[in-house]
Image (cartoon, rainbow, N blue to C red):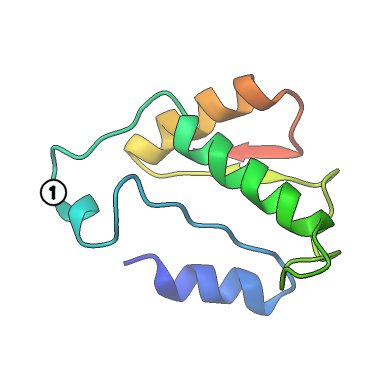
Amino acid sequence: MYNDILNHYSSHGAVVVFPFVKSPEKDKNPFTTNTDGSILVQAIEYAKLANKDPQSPLYGMIDEDNVVIAGHSMGATDSIMASHTLGPVKLTVT
């Protein structure tokens, strides 16, 4: 359900990483949760590693000084928790 807005962000030059807790299909289950921010932290760390890997399509594309974390509902809680775990981020949107 977020596909259109994520494509919109990326069409303006943002590198968008959208992690799933389990998988696109399993995340539709209301009992699939993650509220400690760990999935977002893993996704951001993955993107940072990919940014340094010449074999990655994300190589050199990420401005690590301008990380924005956003989430809705459970994702809002994750965004707050991930922001605290990662340290300073440019913006946290909930």
Query: Is residue 43 placed above or below 59 in the rendered structure?
Result: above
Residue 25 appears left or right of 79: left
Residue 62 appears left or right of 16: right
| Residue placed furthest toward the front | 55
| Residue placed furthest toward the bottom | 11
x, y percent for residue 43: 56, 46
Query: Label 1: how many residues lie within 10 Å, few (<14), some (14-19) or many (20+)?
Result: few
Q: Where, by quadrant of the figure, is residue 91 drawn?
A: top right
Residue sitting at x 67%, y 52%: 47
Q: Nearer the viewer, residue 92 or 67?
A: 67
Q: Nearer the viewer, residue 23 or 14?
A: 23
Residue sitting at x 48%, y 30%: 38
x, y percent for residue 4: 44, 75
**What amino acid is found at the position of numbered circle 1 in the picture?**
Asn
Helix, strand or loop at mark 1: loop
x, y percent for residue 60: 86, 64
Residue 26 appears left or right of 12: left
Q: Nearer the viewer, residue 23 or 75?
A: 23
Q: Where, by quadrant of the figure, is residue 26 drawn?
A: bottom left
The residue carrying mark 1 is: 29
Residue 25 appears left or right of 55: left
Residue sitting at x 57%, y 75%: 8
x, y percent for residue 34: 33, 32
**The N terminus lies in which quarter of the figure?**
bottom left
